[in-house]
Image (spheres, rainbow, N blue to C red):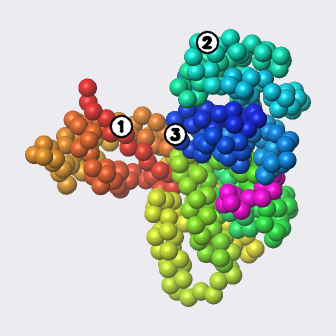
Amino acid sequence: MAYPLVAIVGRPNVGKSTIFNRVVGDRISIVEDTPGVTRDRIYARGEWLGREFRLIDTGGIDIDDQPFMKQITEQAEIAIDEADVIIFMVSALEGLTDADERVAKILYKADKPVILAVNKVDNVEKRAEIFDFYALGFGEPFPISGAHGIGLGDMLDEVIKSFPEDTGDDDEDKIKFSFIGRPNVGKSSLVNALLGEERVIVSPIEGTTRDAIDTKFTDEDGDEFVMIDTAGIRKRGKVYENTEKYSVMRAMRAIDDSNVILMVLDAETGIRDQDKHVAGYAHEAGRAIILVVNKWDTLEKDNHTMQEFEEHIRNEFKYLDYAPIVFVSAKTHQRLDKLPALIKAVNENHKKRISSSTLNEVLLDAIATTPTPTVHGKRLRIYYGTQVAIQPPTFVIFVNDPEMMHFSYQRFLENQIRNAFDFTGTPVHLIIRERK
């Protein structure tokens, strides 16, 4: 599913990054008491009362002649344009400023739900200082404190109430898949080759594709798909244009909205660090993944080329050892006919359910083959397991003491489950819990 997008905006140094870190539960954004430290939008998954969303931390909006201020302002405006809900943050410490009013004028034009949050209200006495902010015209301000975590619950209650209604998905019964990868690996060419027509603009210039484009097609078996072509995701330090930044946001949304991810690699240029970074987005999102090596026609090959390239991929993408690899050419259409069947297969594995009785037979056999470890004379006991979710398949294993479950033994159990059931193409999550 595509998660609602929430953007935190405001002038510099009102505490946006501190609130961002509070909401997502980690210190992802750099926090420093200097205006303009956050130069790019930063994305993370947030959750409140069971509602998940994507949160964007933006640079402060200002028109003063400061280094990077023009770019920071552009990035914030792009985030505003794409967001479903906007948290407009101001500071009780400095009070209402001309810069706050300039930001408000930008938000009036956005025609989006705006939640006004007054940060740095660290004690009861400061609550009286929020009333000046009614003049901004966004209704009742929410007093909060990023430093102490005060008032965030009330603010987030209002945020999730403002999410757009889920109107349902007409393509819910169709498999959605997206091509992701760094720029210029041939994603758009693969789309056109699968469709058999020039539906998407193709160009050798890096960054040609700006938006994620949904295209429906039917395979030879009559099964329907929705194909999403996304812009290439570049290293943050190499993304200069605001349109490129916009593309990254769209690509992240495409990953959220896909059942299956086709991670495209370039046979000509080989594997780069950025390939691992891009694939990590899909892996962390728990999506089914296929590794697609494009431009295979450009290599001089012998009987060992494919095997050696596959071994290289496995060494570089150790965390994707479950993902099948297919070597294709958008130019010659080599092996493209294998993709629809492979997509359907990994999608089925991604939503596969295993009965508790069958699962526990596999666990008992695993323990009999390789007994559980002992720690300080005490043995780990596994009582039973059960599947609690699909997409990806997720299993809870109940034990006497979760601290005794060493990573290596947990990995062993996952491999035994994979050996017993076909989970090709999908991550498998094991959750270790103490039996109460």
Q: Nearer the viewer, residue 157 or 348?
A: 157
Decide: is 197 above or below 96: below
Choose top left, top right, bottom left or bottom right for residue 180: bottom right
Residue drawn at (83%, 16%), measured in percent from left and top? 135
Labels 3, 1: front one: 3
| Magenta extent | 232-244
Quarter of the image with the C terminus is: top left
Q: Which mark is residue 396?
A: 1
Quarter of the image with the N terminus is: top right
Residue drawn at (82%, 61%), measured in percent from left and top? 208
The percent coordinates of residue 370 (x first, y second) are 20, 54
Going from N to C along the chain, the mark reached first, 1 or 2, is 2
Q: Which mark is residue 26?
A: 3
Within-10-Å neighbours for mark 2: few <14, some 14–19, many 20+: few
The answer to whether 189 appears left or right of 152 in the picture is: right
The percent coordinates of residue 93 (x first, y second) are 68, 25
Labels 1, 2: front one: 2
